[in-house]
């Protein structure tokens, strides 16, 4: 990412040669496009996520490589919350939480959820069971409507899940 200057004045930001934001009065940056609000979405380092018991970052588990990047998250037992992250939602709207999940057995449950900041109220959740024992990545998602800017808690979990490439983007 680079910045755009007019003389000595900052007027925006550029990514891959295209303007992606501009500065408006008061110094507020306005971003265009869909931006992932998740920090460390591919689990490439040990930051941003609170991990549950028996959950770890791995580069391979002998039968599965990361969906992208160098690492993914691996839950070793059934765990309602393998990982969680607090995310600041900048504006009201409908958001999509998505992630890639894998598991090497039939009937392994997986879960995506969005809670309020204190983790007490469920704003949206989805769980499902794998229908195949083939160890492949599959994308799962859910939509959640956020009525006002707020901080939410994103949770990922399930029964022996492998998780990679998490995203939370505004879709409407």
Image (cartoon, rainbow, N blue to C red):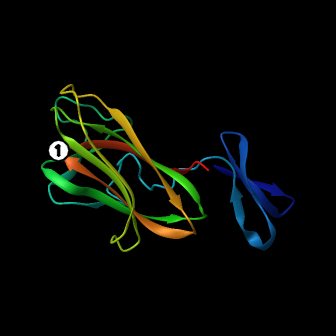
Is 28 or 156 nearer to us in this picture?
A: 156
The residue shown at (58%, 48%) is 171
The residue shown at (21%, 43%) is 109
Tag count in the figure?
Answer: 1
The residue shown at (34%, 33%) is 138
81 left or right, relative to 36: left
Report crowding for label 1: few under 14, some 14 to 19, many 20 or more residues within 10 A (C-alpha).
many
Kindly state the secondary structure of the residue where label 1 is placed: loop
Image spot of residue 2 (x, y percent): 68, 50
Tell me: residue 38, above or below residue 110.
below
Image spot of residue 99 (x, y percent): 38, 43
Image spot of residue 123 (x, y percent): 42, 62
Tell me: residue 88, above or below residue 16.
below
Image spot of residue 86 (x, y percent): 41, 65
Is 14 or 50 nearer to us in this picture?
A: 50
The residue shown at (29%, 49%) is 111
């Amino acid at each position: 990412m680079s910045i755009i200057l007019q003389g000595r004045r900052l007027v925006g930001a550029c990514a891959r040669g295209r303007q992606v934001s501009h500065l408006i009065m008061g110094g507020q940056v306005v971003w265009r496009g869909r931006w992932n609000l998740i920090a460390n979405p591919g689990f490439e380092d040990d930051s941003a996520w609170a991990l549950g018991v028996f959950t770890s970052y791995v580069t391979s588990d002998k039968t599965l490589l990361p969906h992208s990047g160098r690492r993914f998250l691996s839950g070793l037992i059934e765990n309602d919350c393998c990982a969680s992250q607090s995310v600041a939602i900048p504006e009201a709207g409908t958001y999509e939480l998505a992630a890639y999940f894998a598991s090497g057995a039939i009937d392994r449950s997986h879960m995506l959820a969005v809670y309020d900041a204190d983790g007490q109220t469920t704003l949206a959740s989805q769980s499902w069971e794998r229908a195949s024992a083939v160890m492949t990545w599959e994308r799962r998602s859910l939509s959640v409507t956020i009525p006002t800017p707020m901080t939410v808690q994103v949770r990922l979990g399930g029964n022996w899940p492998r998780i990679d490439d998490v995203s939370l983007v505004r879709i409407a």
